[in-house]
Amino acid sequence: MNIYVSGSLAYDRIMDFPGRFSDHILPDKIHVLNVCFNVNGLAEKFGGTAGNIAYNLAMLKEKPLILASAGKDFSHYEAWLKENGLSLEGIRVIPEEFTAGAYITTDRGDNQITGFNPGAMRYPSGFSIPDSGQGAIGILSPGNIEDMLTYSREFKAKQIAFIFDPGQTTSAMSGKQVLEILTGCDIFISNDYELEMVLRMTGMTKSDLLAQTKRAIITTLAENGSLLATHEKEVRIPAVPPRQVVDPTGAGDAYRAGLIKGLVSGRPLDTSARMGATCASFAVECKGTQEHRYTPETFWARHHAFFDGKDS
């Protein structure tokens, strides 16, 4: 089955400050702030919603097509995608821009200062979905808003089932745009905060939103698991315990990959959501969104151990 993953590709450049930001910021001079933080080196990690989802799907032996834009510094990321068996066909390279980048500095108190350069993400990926949508599924994850609107229209016109995941782009969209994409999607997925934002933006209730989807609303609740609401019932999906919690960043994207794997395998929605929870448990065990590793065998071993073998 063809899997289209629309979203972002980005470099996460992570720096650690050995002190505390508060010791170097004078409250009475905040209006003329001019500070420099000397950091203990820099680590570059691969990230972006589309990259993260595709990476997890690749470990589950799927070959999704990434629909995103990258920049002139893409070669390092390109080699990584190839190493993981992922196609570059849907990636547009913008030679005059840098690939989107997050520059994250964390102090000893786990306070963070982040600068984000959207770079090439400002440009739509411009991929044309083939006319035959039979046997395909898509996900619209946070990225270029024009892409999200365009691909949602193409998916609907070509009868391709798709998941709408506005995530961090929710605040950058209008209620009208969100509602246009959501209407006719198969699944709307967000965390509880983003869901509340969408309810306020659209002036609708959760029941109203659910009526606009074909199948379900999934709300992720961090360590409290997730809630699957279909037109018939609500099912609480517990979080799968990881071996250790190192970094929760990327767990949401891993959840979406497990969910998609379940759907393309023909499994029920509740089973697919549980698969998402299992994927997420691996992601939080490493620092970075594409640092964890699992095989289908280790995935299913953990999944069955927690869910008591009722999913197959």
Image: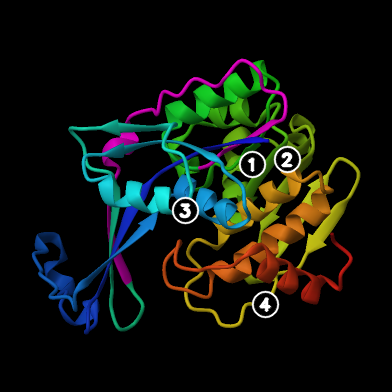
Residue 305, given in percent of the width and then of the height, sits at 79, 76
Q: Mark 3 points at which residue?
A: 84
Q: Mark 4 points at which residue?
A: 241
Image marks 2 and 1: residues in contact by CB distance under 8 Å: yes
Q: Can residue 142 be seen in this view?
A: yes
Q: In which quarter of the image is residue 121?
A: top left
Image marks 2 and 3: residues in contact by CB distance under 8 Å: no
**Mark number, residue 205:** 2
SS category of the residue bearing label 3: loop
Q: Tell whether 219 sits left or right of 153.
A: right
First in sequence: mark 2 vs mark 3: 3
- Residue at 43% in and 32% down: 89
Start-end of magenta stretch: 112-141
- Residue at 22% in and 76% down: 21
Q: Quadrant of residue 146?
A: top left
First in sequence: mark 4 vs mark 2: 2
Kind of residue at badge 3 = Asn
The N terminus - image quarter: top right
3 or 4: mark nearer the eye = 3
First in sequence: mark 1 vs mark 3: 3
Image marks 4 and 1: residues in contact by CB distance under 8 Å: no
Measure the alpha-carbon separation of dots 2 and 1: 6 Å
First in sequence: mark 4 vs mark 1: 1
Vertical side of 285 occupied by 204: above or below = above
Kind of residue at badge 1 = Leu
SS category of the residue bearing label 4: loop
Q: Tell whether 133 sits left or right of 215.
A: left
Measure the alpha-carbon separation of dots 4 and 1: 31 Å
